[in-house]
Image (spheres, helix red, strand yellow):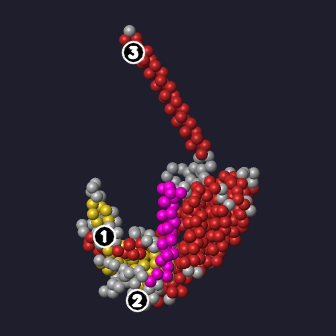
């Protein structure tokens, strides 16, 4: 009886195995057929041969757009982009990159690519400086999606407007025309309108056009008021960004107190979007309170001197900010090449006129992922890295961090004097000759024109 049962089980197993093998085989053939189908538009070259077309593997315009970004990065990798002032309105794609992108774009046309790829094709044409072809492709795309619901068209208009702001050079007039189309959709497109007006405001700040930055931020806030209550609840951070976008140029054009008034309105409007007394509301109120810190710092004269246990590049003068000197204070957190580029350009332009740049940092117990035997060795390593390897302008102030260990052995750092004094403001602080805080912001290249204007007014 037992042997009969074993025979039945063996037969069942045999059939099950055969079924599994057949299924696997069919699945494998299906994968092969799908792969062959997806490769139909790709150009085949003999194995080992050098393709005449370096883009022979790219089957879609989107792949060419990503290739364009890589070509741009590769072009600047061995050059000195930190010697060129960031100017989005006039910035251009280097000629070798344009030539490569043009070759990739020549593989496609608006007549041959699917509708879903027309927006990528239009973006590719912008990279190749073929704006006429870009307009034809994007017009064809929007004609094709005309029958879609308003929120779908709004989303696509938003993506296209943000593309126009991000290419080199920025297509400002075209972007504004696209935003006008989006605004015409009214409340149905309110969420996307917030996003594009925020992008337009950020662009205006990047060229120090403060009046336009204000008007675009106000447009973003107005669009936010048209959002449904559910969208406002879900998009509270988006609305917070709109008020911050307004506070920035208001602080530049008026005072920090005027910016704080904008944030008062923000708190009044946004706090009720979370249940009263809930953890979510407390978290939101904490975030809104943190937004106030940078603007509350403007005009202050009571910041203490920079503290350091070790100075590098100070040549014995360790009083910072120096009385009667314009000082730019910033924290050094690691490799941030765009920020370094901004600092180098500002120093090149204003160092001889008295701008003093001070980096502040702290010991952490390791340097560049390597454990340090003691804090003084770590401080010397950072000093050499910043002064000799990165060759950053200015002086470095290093605090030796006090620390303890928690039960599981991990290190817990104590807050240092400089972090207590300056860290809450965030970004970088410009302190004028009279010791007054004139500006607080990050040092991204997109903020360079604004920093340039503030420094000039403070000299």
Query: Which circle's residue, 3 or 1, is located before the other in the chain?
Result: 3
**Picture residue at 56% right of the left edge, 51% below the top:** 45
Q: Is residue 263 left or right of residue 11?
A: right
Residue 107 rendering spot, x and y as whole percentages: 64, 57
Q: Is residue 91 left or right of residue 12?
A: right
Looking at the rendering, the stretch of residues picked out in magenta corresponds to: 276-301
Q: Is residue 314 visible?
A: yes
Q: Is residue 286 left or right of residue 384?
A: right
Mark 1 Cα shell of 10 Å, populated few (<14), some (14-19), many (≥20): some
Query: Which circle's residue, 2 or 3, is located before the other in the chain?
Result: 3
Tell me which secondary structure the magenta stretch mostly adopts. Answer: helix
Between residue 273 and residue 55, name the one nearer to us.
Answer: 273
- Magenta stretch encompasses residue 415: no
Which secondary structure lies at badge 2? loop
Which secondary structure lies at badge 3? helix
- Magenta stretch encompasses residue 287: yes
From the image, state whether disc 3 or disc 1 is nearer to you: 1
Direction front: furthest residue: 277
Residue 40 rendering spot, x and y as whole percentages: 62, 46
**Picture residue at 71% right of the left edge, 54% below the top:** 150
Q: Which mark is residue 428?
A: none
Give the CA separation, mark 2 to mark 3: 95 Å
From the image, state whether disc 2 or disc 3 is nearer to you: 2
Q: Is residue 80 visible?
A: no
Residue 289 rendering spot, x and y as whole percentages: 49, 67
Q: Which mark is residue 401?
A: 1
Assess whether mark 2 and mark 1 are in contact (beta carbons under 8 angstroms): no
> Which residue is under mark 3?
6
């Amino acid at each position: 009886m037992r042997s009969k049962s074993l025979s039945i089980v063996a037969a069942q197993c045999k059939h099950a195995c055969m079924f599994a093998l057949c299924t696997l085989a069919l699945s494998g053939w299906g994968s092969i057929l799908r792969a062959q189908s997806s490769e139909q538009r790709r150009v085949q070259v003999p194995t080992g041969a050098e393709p005449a077309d370096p883009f022979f593997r790219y089957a879609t315009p989107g792949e060419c757009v990503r290739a364009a970004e890589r070509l741009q990065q590769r072009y600047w990798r061995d050059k000195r982009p930190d010697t060129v002032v960031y100017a989005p309105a006039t910035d251009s794609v280097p000629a070798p990159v344009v030539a490569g992108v043009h070759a990739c774009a020549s593989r496609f046309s608006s007549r041959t690519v699917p509708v879903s790829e027309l927006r990528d094709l239009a973006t590719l044409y912008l990279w190749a400086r073929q704006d006429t072809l870009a307009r034809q492709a994007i017009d064809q795309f929007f004609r094709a999606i005309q029958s879609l619901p308003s929120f779908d068209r709004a989303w696509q208009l938003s993506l296209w407007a943000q593309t126009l702001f991000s290419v080199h050079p920025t297509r400002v007039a075209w972007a504004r025309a696209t935003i006008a189309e989006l605004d015409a959709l009214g409340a149905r497109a309110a969420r996307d309108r917030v996003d594009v007006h925020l992008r337009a405001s950020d662009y205006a700040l990047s060229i120090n056009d403060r009046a336009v930055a204000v008007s675009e931020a106000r447009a973003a806030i107005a669009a936010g008021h048209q959002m449904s209550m559910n969208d406002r609840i879900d998009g509270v951070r988006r609305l917070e960004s709109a008020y911050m976008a307004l506070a920035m140029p208001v602080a530049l054009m008026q005072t920090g107190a005027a910016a704080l008034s904008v944030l008062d309105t923000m708190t009044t409007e946004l706090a009720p979007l979370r249940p009263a007394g809930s953890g979510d509301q407390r978290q939101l109120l904490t975030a809104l309170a943190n937004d106030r810190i940078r603007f509350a710092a403007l005009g202050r004269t009571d910041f203490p001197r920079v503290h350091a246990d070790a100075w590098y590049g100070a040549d014995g003068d360790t009083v910072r900010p120096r009385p009667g000197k314009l000082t730019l204070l910033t924290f050094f957190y690691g490799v941030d090449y765009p920020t370094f580029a901004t600092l180098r350009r500002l120093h090149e332009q204003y160092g001889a006129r008295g701008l003093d740049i001070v980096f502040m940092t702290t010991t952490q117990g390791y340097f560049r992922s390597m454990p340090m035997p003691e804090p003084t060795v770590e401080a010397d390593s950072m000093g050499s890295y910043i002064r000799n390897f990165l060759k950053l302008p200015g002086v470095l102030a290093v605090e030796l961090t006090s620390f303890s260990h928690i039960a599981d052995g991990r290190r817990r750092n104590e807050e240092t004097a400089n972090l207590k004094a300056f860290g809450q403001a965030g970004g970088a602080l410009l302190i004028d000759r009279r010791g007054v805080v004139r500006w607080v912001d990050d040092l991204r290249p997109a903020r360079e024109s604004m920093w340039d204007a503030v420094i000039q007014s403070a000299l």
